[in-house]
Image (tube, rainbow, N blue to C red):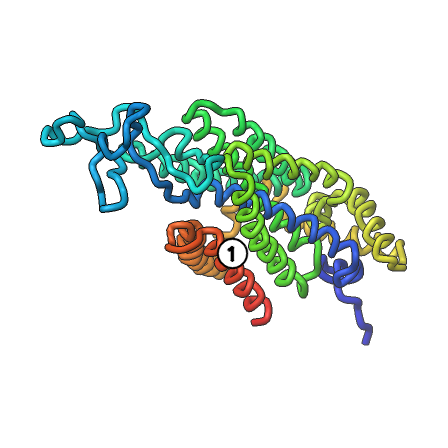
Amino acid sequence: MSLTAPNPTMDKMMDKLGTPGKYQVVVLLLLATNFIPVVINHLLVMSVQETDHHCKVPSGGPPSLFIPQATNSTLQSCQMYQDPSNPSQGYQPCVEGHTFVFSSKNKWSFVAEWSLVCERENLTNVIRNTYLGGMMVGGIIFGILSDRFGRRGVMLACLYSQSLIGIGLYFVEEFWVFVGLRCAQGVFIQGLLCVTYSLAVEVVGPDWRTLAVCLLRAVWSAGIVLFVVVTRYVEHWRFVQLAVNIPAMATLAYIWFIPESLRWLLSKGKVKQADKVVSSILSYNSLKVDSASLQLEMEAVSRDLVSSQDARRPPSMLDIFQISGMRIKVGVLSFAWFSVSMCFHGMSYYVPILSGDEDLDMMIGAGIELGAFLLVFVI
């Protein structure tokens, strides 16, 4: 009885390239840094801190003469006397704008920039919701584009685009231009997030994918800590934009270090390009593998991946609903992701409204998240 060798698979081939080796570790660490601008921009938009304010009064006059008391020690935030000499005539909204009271004279937020308080307070929700809407669009668009044109190029386009938009926000003077740019940044931020996930899990073998994802999430927690440090010492929101996004441009070096996904290359029949990536991995990991045998294995894997696709049309998200078992799994996972995301975003983004030191609250929240990610990996 003759024994036939098992058909080569993508996962078996990945194991021959290091499990993981130095190359995979370095690439994962570089990819993990993508999460730093993602989480900081999330928090810049979503975690709007409460700011003390009251109506602006004529220069030289004490505020208590024009503004009624809210408590013994604070003034009304959104009302002032119609006639300060005769308070019995009642109140009126702030006529000349608002005065904001920060802990530091150099502190300035976009809420104060456009007076997003009192009757304009709902505009902060406009900023959040348009940003989240952009993220929803970006997740769909760039998932499809990365499947069609490759992970690496799409990831780099998202990375550089969101950084340039972030730098551009420094120069914005009009509120609705700010909203539009934030929405556009949300599109590219979510594209960066999704494609980075795909590249990270495809650069290692199946046994290490859980650790790869946990590493990304650990850097997410580190990004929260960095956010606290940046906003504590860089107090004006415009300079925060520069402090976050200018260093991100250093990722231009990604062009030389981040490879295209081997799985994507082989699924598109690009064996020659895949062979160049494999050669780099073997060299960096100091591995000696029979190149002819590995070449035949790549060709076999590529033929298998290409033949499993419908040549008449490219793969789409609708394909996952063609199999009943897959439909159930997608439904369950989607519901779980939706539920967990609501709780996670609610706790993460509204930490600043808790009592006590806001920076300390954010640091504690980051520590809890990091512990949760480590627990997920252990379990």
Which residue corresponds to the image point at 55% horizontal and 68% vertical from the top-left? 375
210 is higher (above) or lower (below) than 317: below
x, y percent for residue 349: 43, 49
**Residue matched to label 1:** 363
Q: Is residue 196 left or right of residue 289?
A: left
What residue is drawn where x is 87% and y is 59%? 287
Q: Quadrant of residue 77?
A: top left
Residue 282 placement: quadrant: bottom right
Q: Please determine whether, in this image, residue 335 is positioned above or below residue 193.
A: below
Q: Residue at x 12, y 28 (%)?
A: 86
For the point 79% across and 47% down, the residue is 277
Answer whether residue 324 is visible to the viewer in this image: no
**Left or right of 59 in this view: 197:** right
Amino acid type shown at disc 1: Met
**Camera sees residue 88:** yes
Observer-nearest residue: 4 or 116? Answer: 116
Q: Quadrant of the N terminus?
A: bottom right
Task: Report helix, strand or loop for mark 1.
Answer: helix
Residue 17 position, x and y percent, is: 79, 58
| Residue 331, picture quadrant | bottom left
Front position in the image: 223 or 208:
223
Q: In the rendering, at what x and y percent does residue 60 appear? A: 31, 25
Quadrant in which the C terminus is drawn: bottom right
Q: Indicate whether 201 appears above or below 250.
A: below
Q: Nearer the viewer, residue 281 or 35?
A: 35
Image coordinates of residue 51 in percent, x first then y, are: 37, 41
Q: How many marks?
A: 1
In this rendering, would 235 be left or right of 164?
A: left
Badge 1: how crowded within 10 Å, few (<14), some, or many (20+)? many
Front residue of 13/142: it is 142
